[in-house]
Image: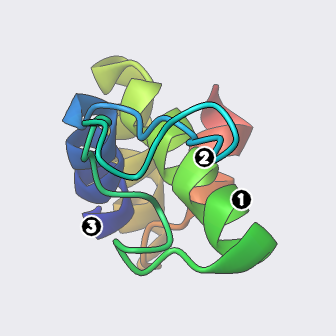
Amino acid sequence: MAERQIGEELAKLPSAQGRRSDLVGSTDKVDEAATLDELGFRGSPGRERAAEYKQLAAAPAEVVETAVSAATAEGCPVTKADLRRVS
């Protein structure tokens, strides 16, 4: 599943740290990790989607294989709901 692969990649990325402009001067170096917004996960729905993808990536391989097998046997595409149902 593409969502699972995206979640795996998101999990590898360092978390972007917030920056309080009242505490950090404009010339100070701050961690430059990309934010979810910069990666295309805009707003609250984007953050929720990114979290969902990370949860899918964290699912054990056996659960994923079982969900894929069950959906294939039924002749249906695999969905995130299938993964939740199996786990």
Residue nearest the viewer, comparing 54 with 63: 54
Q: Please, what is the three-letter code of the amino acid marked with disc 3?
A: Ala
Q: Earlier in the sequence, mark 1 or mark 3?
A: 3
Please indicate whether residue 51 sits to the left or right of residue 10 in the image: right
- Residue 27, given in percent of the width and then of the height, sits at 29, 47
> Label 1, on which residue?
48
Q: Quadrant of the N terminus?
A: bottom left
Q: Residue at x 71, y 76 (%)?
A: 43
Dot 3 corresponds to which residue? 2
Three-letter residue code for mark 1: Glu
Picture quadrant of residue 78: bottom left
Q: Nearer the viewer, residue 86 or 36?
A: 36
Residue 10 image offset from top left, x and y in percent: 31, 45
Disc 1 to disc 3, C-alpha distance: 16 Å
Q: Is residue 58 left or right of residue 13?
A: right
Question: What SS does tag 2 mark?
Answer: helix
Q: Residues within 10 Å of mark 2 (few under 14, many from 20)?
A: some
Which residue lies at the image location 61% right of the left edge and 50% below the top edge?
52
Work out how far the residue at label 2 is from the one at label 3, CA to CA, in angstroms: 14 Å
**Nearest-to-viewer mark from 1 and 3:** 1
Question: Circle 2 sits on which residue?
Answer: 51
